[in-house]
Image (cartoon, rainbow, N blue to C red):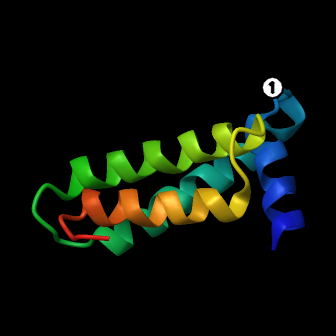
Amino acid sequence: EPALSSACTTAMLRDDPDVARLRDLIGAEVHRRLAAAVGDEPDAAARTATLDLLFTGALVQVGIGHLSYDAMAERLREAAALTMGRHP
């Protein structure tokens, strides 16, 4: 859903104390899900950290209008596959 994604991106990128708690909750949940997806893979902590950076970098790039959500989804899929040692 592009509208939901846009709202989440706005919340994550705002420098506003009123949304800091929401930003922290969303960030923690994204990290938890990424860590669960990585599981017990070799170098799990490094892979999870890389996926965290990919996600937040994607938010910034989409938030500034560099790429569309659809284009970013494809890039994230490819980058995540490479991070996990799989070919996209």
Residue nearer the viewer, 51 or 65: 65
Task: Find residue 18 and report its horizontal and vertical position in percent.
Answer: 89, 35
> What residue is pinned by disc 1?
15
Labels in figure, total: 1
SS category of the residue bearing label 1: loop
Residue at 60 percent across and 50 percent down: it is: 27
Callout 1 crowding tier (Cα within 10 Å): few <14, some 14–19, many ≥20: few
Residue type beneath disc 1: Asp
Task: Find residue 68 and report its horizontal and vertical position in percent.
Answer: 73, 54
Task: Find residue 44 and report its horizontal and vertical position in percent.
Answer: 20, 58
**Residue 21 seen anywhere in this rendered image of the structure:** no
Left or right: 66 as drawn, with respect to 74: right
Left or right: 41 as drawn, with respect to 72: left
Q: Is residue 25 above or below residue 12?
A: below
Left or right: 48 as drawn, with respect to 3: left
Residue nearer the viewer, 3 or 14: 3
Q: Is residue 65 above or below residue 87?
A: above
Quadrant (top left, top right, bottom left, bottom right) of the C terminus: bottom left
Task: Find residue 2 and report its horizontal and vertical position in percent.
Answer: 83, 66
